[in-house]
Image (cartoon, helix red, strand yellow):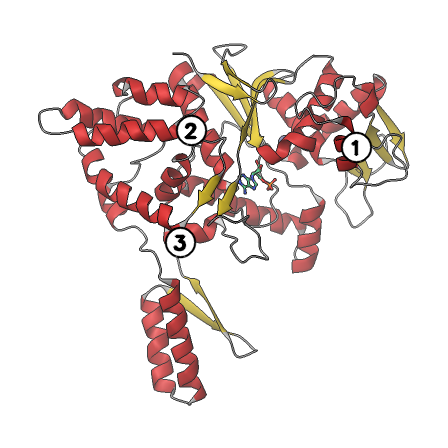
Amino acid sequence: MALQLYNTLTRRKEEFTPIDRRNVRMYVCGPTIYDYAHIGNARPLIVFDVLFRLLRQIYGAERVAYVRNITDVDDKINARAAERGISIRQLTEETNAIFQADAKALGCLEPTAQPRATEHVPAMIAMVERLIASGHAYRADGHVLFDVPSMPDYGRLSKRPLDEMIAGARVEVAPYKKGAMDFVLWKPSSPDEPGWESPWGRGRPGWHLECSAMSWQYLGEIFDIHGGGIDLVFPHHENEIAQTCSAFHHEVMANYWVHNGFLQVEGEKMSKSLGNFVTIHEALVDWPGEVLRLNMLKTQYRQPIDWTLAGLRESQRELDRWYPLAKQFVASPAMLAPDFVAALEDDLNTPDAITALRRLYRETSEEVAFAGTRFASCGHLIGLFEKDLADWEGGPIPIDKEHVQSLIEARLTARAAKDWALSDRIRDELGAMGIALKDNKDGTTSWEVKR
Ligand code: AMP
Ligand code: ZN
C-alpha cells in the first residue's frame, strides 16, 4: 500500500504522491522561542518526526527535506525579554538551546533545516514587494496589509463561513485596515523594538509572512507537505496560503496539509491557571524521552490525546519489558514487519503499528529470532530502542512529588522549632534524591530537580 495522508485541504485521506520523488519536501511550523515548550508542543515535534522517518524509509534518507522554522522575532519575545531584563538575543539563544535539547531528548531527528526568521528578512521584504506590485497588498499608516478580498478563494483550507472569519479577524482591530479580514505583512518598529530597514521604513514582519518566506526559500514556491497543530489552520495557514499563492500566482502552496490534534492533561485543557501546565523540560526529569514518545504515539495523531500519569506509567512499564529483548537484535530497515509499515502508511496509524509491535514481542523466541529482528527494526523506525540497555535501566526514576512535599513540610516544621540539625538532615535526604531546595523570603520553600 502506498502512503495515505489525511489532507485538511480536501478533508479526505489521499494517496501521497510527491512532486519529485527524489526531493520530497515538508515544512512544519516551529516554535516561537520565548519560553519553555510544553508537552502539547511535543506532539507536532514527535508526529512530524515519525512522518519524516517514514518518508526517509520510503524515498531514501537523502531524498527528504524537512524544514522546521524558528520564530525569533515576535511581540511575545520582546515582552518577555523586557520583563526579565535581558536582551532579546539572550532570551532567544537560551530558549532555542532548551528547545533543541528537548527535541533531541524526545528522540527527534534533526530537521534538514531550521531557518530563523531574523535571518530571512530580505526574502520577506521581497515577498511583500511582489504582493504590492500585483495588487494583493497595500500600505497604510506605516504598515503593509494583505488585501484579503483580492484573493477570491480565501478560506479554502479552513472552510470557515465568511462571517466567522470576519469575527475572528476583528480581534485585531486597526483603523488603517481596508477590510476587516486584512492582515499585517509588515509593521513599523519603534526605536527600542527590533526592526529592519525596508521600502516602508524600519519595521518587522508579521508572523504569517515568516513561514511563507522561509518555506519559499528552502522548498520552493510549491512543495509537498505543510504541517502543524490543528489550531494553526486559521488564521495562520490560511494566511500563509494567501501570501504564497498570491505572490507566485499558483493555485496551491503545498499539496498536503497535515494537522495534529490537541493534547489535554488528565481530561482538562492544559493551562497555567489550572496548574496542569507541564513543560517538556519538566516531563523529561521524570520520564525518559522514549516514554513520552511512545505515550504520544499510542494515539493516532489527528485524535485528541488525554495525557495522563496512568498512561505514562503504562508506557514506562511497556518499554521496560521491551528494551532487554529489542537490544538482543540489530535493527535493519530491510527487516520491517509488513503490517507495522502498513499501519504507519495508513495516515500514520501509530496505535495499530504499536499493536503490531506488541505481537512481534510475543512471537519472539529462540526459534523465531526473526520476529525479534523485526521487533527491533520496527521500534527503531519510530524512534524507540535508541539507548543502550544499561543507560535505559539507569534512566530517571519518577519523583514522588507528594513525598517531596511532605519532607519539605517536615523541614519547615523543624525550622520553626529551631531544630536545625533535623532541618539539615531532611535537606540532605532530599539532596540525595536529586532535589535542590530554595528558601524564599516569604517563608515558603520551592524545589527543583538537579540534573
Ligand atoms: P505555539 O508555540 O503555540 O505556536 O505552538 C507550537 C506548535 O505546537 C504548533 O504546531 C501548535 O499547533 C502545537 N500545539 C500547541 N499547543 C498544543 C496542544 N495542547 N496539543 C497539541 N499541539 C499543540
Ligand atoms: Zn507557519
Q: Which residue is mark 2?
A: 50
Return the disc, 2 or 3, that comes first in the chain's sequence: 2
The residue at 63%/15% (across/down) is: 222
Q: Position of residue 439 (x, y in %)?
A: 49, 75
Query: Nearer the observer, disc 1 or disc 2?
Result: 1
Q: Residue at x 51, y 55 (%)?
A: 276
Q: Is residue 200 left or right of residue 21?
A: right
Query: Looking at mark 2, is its residue's CB closer than 8 Å to ligand 1?
Result: no
Left/right of residue 313 with respect to residue 151 in the rendered view: left
Q: Amino acid at mark 2?
A: Val
Q: Earlier in the sequence, mark 1 or mark 2?
A: 2
Q: Amino acid at mark 1?
A: Ile
Find the distance from the CA under tag 2 to the CA under tag 3: 23 Å
Label 1 SS: helix
Mark identifier at residue 166: 1
Let me know if residue 137 appears in the view: yes
Q: Quadrant of residue 159?
A: top right
Task: Point out residue 160 in the picture as x, y percentages from the top left corner.
Answer: 70, 27
